[in-house]
């Protein structure tokens, strides 16, 4: 029989309080539960010692505490770890932990969608069409699975933790699933639970301009822009979304991003593609493009994947590009490729989910079907 109990993971504080009131409990019970769920990482109501046995039974009868299902865990020779996670409907997504070079702490790269709408030509994820948005439970649950893997429960009181940062840079475009992403990140930032500071969270976008200001106002997290080209012609070829939001519009949205300052600079991600965007002239155009913005750069050597049509720039060309930016006062480190042996490096994520075939997705788009799991109209707008 299908389990009809409601999952408490992914509910906002307000929604969790409403659930407690609905079963006749006092609102303060939600605070007790929140601590158990997100500070202690508890999944069994009967192990929640701050809750009475009567309430434990009542919670067990009506609710569950459910993480995404761990399908496969892979470890790289460089310490990177990748999890393939399954969801109740049979779909999957990937999550990656990238340790700092000293391996004392690191960053969890979280997915926001199954597949992606954007079809960026250099990105492996873009070869998997969007199946659906992930729910708040499935988004924050990825970080919780990572904590399970590293045994980081309860949340350390002194802030000392290996999983110290979050980046929304996994599968999907976070801005196209903003409401669910925002709910999940607010849970992650809550000081009574997981407790990740907003200064340690970065949301990466391909440039969904209408959502950028809202992101800054509601979340206040760090912003990263997937840029990758300094002309509209090349960027539109690499990233079709540029046809809708060209560079001039995107740069103005960056200038208007709430909270951007010299102490909180916008990160521009720039993938290095041999013979396409890696010349000294390109670097100088990039400087002109971001003039006046509090900015830093993340130069990413292209990570090949099966069937990719690009080559990585030569190391000398990447270094020259970086030197030009740094000589003009900008931070422009060259990102070391991590996890490429397990296809966990930047641009390599792609789940093996085949639940919804491309033919079915195409048919739904043609019919204009628009439901909560597959916003067809939004996808058509994104790639038009």
Image: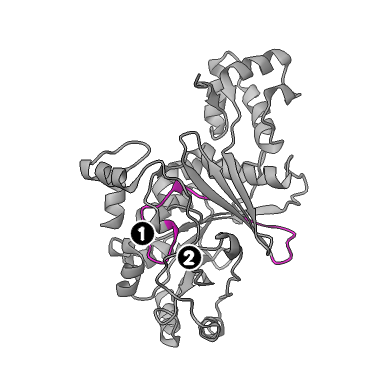
Name the side, left or right, on which 247 lies relative to 328: left
Residue 16: which quarter of the image? top right
- The verdict on residue 369 being magenta is no
Is 172 in front, or is 260?
172
Image quadrant for the C terminus?
bottom left
Q: Look at the image and give the residue range highlighted in magenta.
A: 101-125
| Residue found farthest to the left | 367
Q: Which residue is mark 2?
A: 305
Q: Residue at x 58, y 22 (%)?
A: 63
Residue 233 visible in the picture: yes
Closest to the observer, 340 or 20 = 340
Measured from the top left, where is residue 231 in percent x and y? Answer: 34, 75
* Residue 3 relative to residue 48: left or right: left
Q: What is the spatial separation of the Cα atoms under label 2 and label 1, in whole angstroms?
A: 15 Å
Q: Residue at x 65, y 22 (%)?
A: 29
- Describe residue 140's horizontal placement relative to residue 238 as left or right: right
N-term-proximal mark, 2 vs 1: 1
Structural crowding at the residue carrying mark 1, measured as other residues with C-alpha within 10 Å and reported as few (<14), some (14–19) or many (≥20) = many
Residue 354: percent from left, percent from top: 42, 45
Residue for badge 1: 119
Residue positioned 53% across, 32% down in the render = 11
**Which of the two residues, 161 or 126, is positioned nearer the viewer here?**
126
Q: In which quarter of the view is residue 77 placed?
A: bottom right
On screen, residue 49 above or below 336: above
Q: Residue at x 27, y 51 (%)?
A: 380
Please name which of the two marks, 2 or 1, marks the residue nearer to the observer: 2
**Residue 61 horizontal/vertical position (percent):** 60, 16
Q: Are marks 2 and 1 in contact (CB under 8 Å)?
A: no
């Amino acid at each position: 029989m299908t389990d009809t109990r409601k999952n408490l993971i992914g509910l906002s504080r307000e929604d969790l309080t409403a659930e407690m009131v609905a079963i006749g409990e006092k609102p303060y019970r939600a605070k007790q539960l929140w601590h158990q769920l997100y500070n202690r990482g508890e999944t069994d109501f009967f192990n929640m010692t701050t809750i009475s046995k009567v309430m434990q039974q009542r919670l067990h009868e009506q609710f569950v505490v459910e993480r995404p299902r761990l399908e496969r865990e892979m470890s790289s020779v460089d310490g990177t770890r990748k999890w393939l996670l399954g969801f109740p409907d049979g779909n999957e997504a990937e999550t990656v932990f990238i340790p700092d070079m000293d391996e004392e702490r690191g960053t969890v790269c979280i997915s926001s969608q199954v597949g992606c709408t954007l079809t960026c030509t250099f990105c492996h994820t873009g070869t998997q069409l969007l199946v659906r948005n992930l729910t708040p439970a499935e988004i924050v649950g990825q970080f919780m699975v990572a904590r399970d893997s590293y045994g980081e429960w309860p949340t350390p009181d002194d802030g000392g933790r290996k999983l110290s940062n979050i980046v929304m840079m996994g599968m999907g475009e976070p801005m196209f699933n903003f409401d669910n992403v925002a709910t999940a990140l607010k849970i992650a930032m809550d000081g009574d639970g997981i407790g990740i500071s907003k200064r340690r969270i970065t949301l990466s976008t391909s440039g969904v301009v209408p959502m950028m200001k809202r992101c800054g106002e509601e979340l206040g997290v760090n912003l990263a822009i997937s840029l990758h080209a300094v002309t509209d012609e090349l960027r539109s070829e690499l990233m079709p979304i540029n046809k809708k939001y060209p560079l001039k519009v995107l740069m103005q949205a960056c200038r208007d991003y709430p909270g951007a300052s010299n102490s909180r600079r916008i990160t521009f991600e720039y993938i290095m593609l041999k013979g396409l965007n890696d010349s000294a002239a390109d670097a100088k155009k990039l400087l002109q493009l971001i003039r006046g913005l509090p900015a830093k750069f993340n130069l990413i050597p292209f990570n090949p994947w099966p069937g990719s049509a690009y080559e990585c720039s030569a190391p000398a060309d990447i270094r020259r590009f970086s030197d030009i930016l740094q000589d003009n006062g900008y931070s422009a480190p060259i990102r070391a490729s991590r996890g490429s042996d397990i296809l966990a490096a930047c641009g390599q994520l792609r789940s093996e989910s085949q639940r919804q075939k491309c033919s079915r997705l195409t048919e739904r788009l043609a019919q204009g079907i628009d439901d909560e799991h597959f916003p067809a109209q939004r996808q058509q707008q994104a790639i038009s």
